[in-house]
Amino acid sequence: MRPESLRQRIAERAGQALLLLTLLACWQAAAIFFPAPHLPRLERIALSFWNLVHGELLVREVLPSAARVGAGLALGIVLGTAIGLAIGYFRALDPWLRPVLEFLRALPAVTILPAALLLLGPSDAMRVSIIVFGCAPPVLLAAIDGARRVDELLLDTARVCGLGPGHTVARVIVPAALPQVFAGIRVALGVALIMMVISELLAANNGLGAFIQRNQRLFNTANVYAGVLVIGVLAWLFTAGMLELEKRVLHWHRGWRGVTQ
Amino acid sequence: MFPGDDVTAMRPILSVDAVTKSYGGGAMPVLQDARFWQAEGEFLAVVGPSGCGKTTLLRCIAGLMKPDGGRVLHRGVEHANPPRWLSIVFQDYNRSLFPWLSVRRNAGFGLHNLDKAQRERRVEEALAAVGLSHAAELYPWQLSGGMQQRTALARSIAASPELLLLDEPFASVDAQTRMDLQDLVMRICQDMKLATLLVTHDIDEAVLMADRVVVLSTRPARVVDDIRVPLARPRDQLATKESQEFLQLRHRVFTAVRQQVKPQAHRP
C-alpha cells in the first residue's frame, strides 16, 4: 500500500468529483443547447434510473439479469475449476485436450448464441448456458496453469506427510492453484456480463438487455441510458464482490508474493 | 556406547542395501551399489562431493524415488512410497512450507489421521521444541529463513517419526542461524533419541553433529568410507570444534572426501 496523506487523498477525491461533474455538465449543456431525442436531460435519466432500481422494474428487469450472471458465473467457475484442476493434475491429458482448449479460448463466445437459441430456445436455460460457455474457458485454462505450476517440493512434502490423492488435491493443489483461478475469474466476470447483455438484447422479454432494446425501439432514450447505467453499477457490484472474496480467500497470497518476488 | 561397536547387537532401523539408480535410462548412473546401515537412535551424516547423488540417495530412502536396483529396508522390511515412520526436512524451506497455512497449521500438516485434541497437543509440543510457540499464528512469508526451517522441523517431529531425514537443511541460511539450527537439531534428536540421517556437503557440520559419517564417492556414488565420531555429547560449537579429537576426525573425513574430488579435477 502506498502511503498517502489525508491531504493527498482529499485532493484526489476532489479531482475525481470535478472530472465527473464536468462530464455531466457537458452532457447537460449539450442536452439543453442541442435538444434531440437521443440526448435526454440528466434529470430525466436520473428519474429513469431511480425507477429502474426500485419497485416493480427492479424485480422485473434488474434482478433477472443479476440472477443470470450470478448463476452462469457460479456454474462456469465451478465447472472450469474442477475440469481445469483435473487436466492440470493429470498432465497426460493435456496434450490431447490442448487443441480443443485453445480453440475454445480463441473463439469469441458470443458466436455460439444463435446456435444456442436454436438448441434451447429463448429460455433462461439458454441464457445461463451461454454465460457458462463464455466464462468457463478462462477459468479452466487458468486452473490448468495453476495446478501445473504447483511446486514439486510441496507435492513431495504432501507425499511424505502421507496424503492420498484426494487429500493432495483438496489440501495442496486447490489452494496452490487458487491465485491463478482468481485471475481467470476476473476475466470470466467480464465475459459473463457481455454474454448476459447480448443474450438479453437478442432474445429475452425481461432483463436489462431486453429493457434497453425495448426502450430503444420506443425512442425512450432516458430509459436506454438508465439501463446502461444500471448495467455499469451491476458490473461494479459483481467486481467489488469478487475482489472482496479474493481478498478473503487469498489473504496469504499478497504477502507471500511480496516476499518471494 | 556408540553404534557400530557391535553391529550384531543392533537391529538397524535403516539399511541401504546395494542401491543403484541412474537417470536417462541408464545413461547417467548416480548411485552404484550404495550400502550402509543405521542403528536405532543413531545420528548418521552422509557427506560427499557436491553433485555426487546425495539427494538422490535420500529420495530413494524416503520412498519418493524407486531405486533401479537394491533395497532400502526399515527394520529388515522393504517399503514403497514415503512411509509414515519417517519424515523429511528439505533444503528449500521456502518451497516446502505451505504459504497459505499458518505456522501452526504447517506444523500439523501431516497429522490428519489424529483426532483434534491429539493433533493440537503434538503441534504445541513440536512448536515448543523448536521455540516457535510465540509465532504459531504467523504465515511463512512473515518469518525469517531460520524460523521457516524451524517450522519445517516442527512439522517433521510432530509426526513423531522413527527416522528423521535432513536434506542439506542448513544450506540456505546465514552462518549464525545455521549454528543455532545445528544446536537445535542436535538437542531435539538427543532428547527424543531420534534416529537422524543428515545429508550434507559440509564436513564440519557432519563431524559436529553425527555419531557416524558415511562418505560417498563422486558419481556414480558408492560408500567409500564409514567413520565413527566418538565425540562426547552435548557438543558445543566452540569447545567441540576446537578439540583435538574433532580436528583429527575432520581431517580424516576431509581427506576421504578430497580423495574423491581430486581425480575429477585432473580430467582433461
Image (cartoon, rainbow, N blue to C red):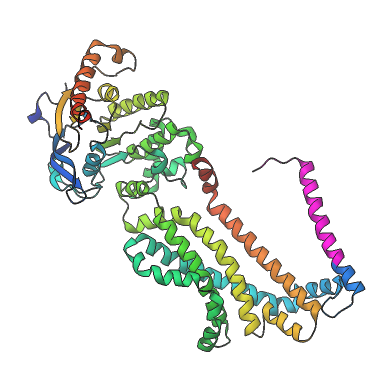
Among all residues in the image, which is located at the extreme right? A33
Q: Report if residue A15 lies within the magenta region.
A: yes
Above-or-below relation of B213 to A47: above
Q: Which residues are magenta?
A: A1-26
Q: Residue at x 36, y 40 (%)?
A: B155
* Front one among A198 and B260: B260
Query: In terms of depth relative to the viewer, which is nearer, A134 or B211?
Result: A134
Q: Does residue B134 appear in this view?
A: yes
Whole-percent x and y of residue A129? 52, 78
Provide residue B184's location: percent of width, then percent of height: 36, 26
In the image, farthest residue toward the left: B8
The percent coordinates of residue A92 (x first, y second) are: 31, 63
Horizontal side of A135 relative to A44 (left or right) equals left
Q: Name the residue rendered at 73%, 85% in the picture.
A: A214
Snapshot quadrant of residue A198: bottom right
* Residue A120 percent across, percent down from the top left: 52, 86
Most frequent secondary structure within the magenta stretch: helix
**From the viewer's perspective, is residue A168 above or below residue B35?**
below
